[in-house]
Image (cartoon, grey):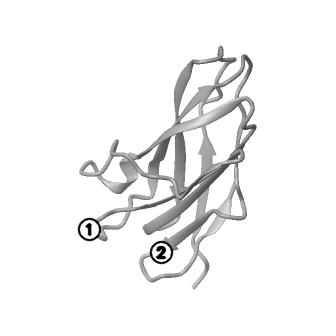
């Protein structure tokens, strides 16, 4: 069978922030099939912004949506977090994967990019998804 695909977007685009301001950004996902887990990686300028928190999005079900997810790396301008439903229920194929709260350390427009080397989505059968950006 053809490899399943997933597309990720960070949005919406945000205007300039003042130092100390915080904003919560949704990371949106669209996939061609159900997935059971995801590893999300973001890259940013550590002198301009810091990731303060990560929350599960609605694709993992309302029971876990908006609960904290602890990144396994959050330093040197990179943040990596593993996301999966606790009860092995597959995630829905379209919606918010996670909410990432950032804080501006300096005035300006914050920029976050997906860390392509770490992104990983697993299908229910354990196969990887192809990732589109």
Estimate the spatial distance between the alpha carbons at disc 2 and disc 1, rounded to whole Å: 15 Å
| Residue at 61 percent of width and 77 percent of height | 3
Left or right? Give the position of 106 relative to 128: right
Label 1 element class: loop
Residue that sits furthest to the bottom in the current view: 1
| Residue at 30 percent of width and 64 percent of height | 86
Residue underneath mark 1:
87
Numbered marks: total: 2
Q: Tell me the quadrant of the picture where the N terminus can be found.
A: bottom right
Dot 2, crowdedness within 10 Å: few (<14), some or many (≥20)?
A: some
Residue underneath mark 2:
123
| Residue at 57 percent of width and 18 percent of height | 21
Q: Earlier in the sequence, mark 2 or mark 1?
A: 1
Residue 91 percent location from the top left of the image: 38, 61
Label 2 element class: strand
**Is residue 64 shown above or below 33?**
above
Residue 103 percent location from the top left of the image: 58, 27
Residue 9 percent location from the top left of the image: 62, 45
Left or right? Give the position of 33 relative to 108: left
Left or right? Give the position of 36 relative to 88: right
Dot 1, crowdedness within 10 Å: few (<14), some or many (≥20)?
A: few
Residues marked 2 and 1 touching at CB (< 8 Å): no
Residue 103: mark in rendering? none
**Is residue 34 shown above or below 99?**
below
| Residue at 74 percent of width and 19 percent of height | 108
Q: Nearer the viewer, mark 2 or mark 1?
A: 1
């Amino acid at each position: 069978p053809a490899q399943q695909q997933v597309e990720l977007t960070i949005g919406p685009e945000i205007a300039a922030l003042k130092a100390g301001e915080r904003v919560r950004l949704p990371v949106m996902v669209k996939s061609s099939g159900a997935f059971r887990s995801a590893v999300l990686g973001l890259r940013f300028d550590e002198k301009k912004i810091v990731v303060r928190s990560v929350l599960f999005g609605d694709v993992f079900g309302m029971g876990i949506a908006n609960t904290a997810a602890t990144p396994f790396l959050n330093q040197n301008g990179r943040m990596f977090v593993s996301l999966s439903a606790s009860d092995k229920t597959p995630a829905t194929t379209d919606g918010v994967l996670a909410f990432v709260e950032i804080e501006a350390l300096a005035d300006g427009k914050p920029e976050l990019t997906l860390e392509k080397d770490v992104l990983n989505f697993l299908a229910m059968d354990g196969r990887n998804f192809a990732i589109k950006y």
